[in-house]
Amino acid sequence: MVRTRSWKSVRSSRLSAPAAVRVKARVEQQIRTLKELRNELAVTQSELAANADMTQSELSRLESRADHRVSSLRRYVEALGGEIEIAAIIGGRRVKLTDV
């Protein structure tokens, strides 16, 4: 069995303080809201709504929600040209879910 350690313990034992700051900044750069992702790709709500087969107002509501249905999120991401991956992390083990 593979022994897992918390990120905190790895960071404290292996990363210098400046390196830890750099890692944290890189992680934060990868986190986006749906709206931030769309804006980063220079796509308007109207363009994306047409690609996702929904109205602009539906898309606006989707972007402002705190909770999303997987099917809605999939439509949104696919309309941007991407795909959704969902994984469960249980006891340090990452499992990609294929039936969602």
Image (tube, rainbow, N blue to C red):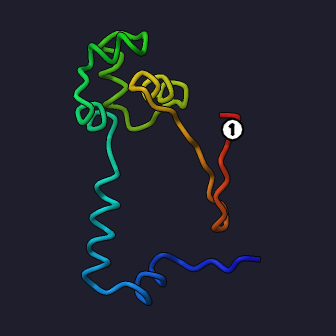
Image location of residue 97, percent across then percent down: 67, 43
Kindly indicate the quadrant of the structure image that contains residue 76.
Answer: top left
x and y, in percent, of residue 89 in the image: 62, 58
Residue drawn at x 60%, y 49% as measured from the top left: 87
Give the vertical position of 3 relative to 22 (above or below).
Answer: below
- Residue 79 image point, x, y percent: 42, 21
Residue type, label 1? Thr
Circle 1 sits in a helix, a strand or a loop, which is it?
Answer: loop
User: 44 above or below 33?
Assistant: above
Give the side of residue 48 with respect to residue 18, left or right.
right
Neighbor class of circle 1 (other Cα within 10 Å; few <14, some 14-19, many 20+) is few
Residue furthest front in the image: 81
Q: Residue at x 57, y 80 (%)?
A: 5
Q: Residue at x 65, y 48 (%)?
A: 96
Give the image quarter of residue 59: top left
Residue at image location 67% in from the left, 67% down from the top: 91
User: On the rendered structure, is 76 left or right of 16?
Assistant: right
Identity of the residue furthest to the bottom in this view: 13
Would you identify the image quadrant in which residue 33 lies?
top left
Image quarter where the N terminus lies is bottom right
Residue of label 1? 98
Of all residues shown, which one is farthest toward the right?
Answer: 1
Q: Quadrant of the C terminus?
A: top right
Q: Is residue 69 left or right of residue 80?
A: right
Count of numbered tags: 1
The x, y position of residue 99, in whole percent, is: 70, 34
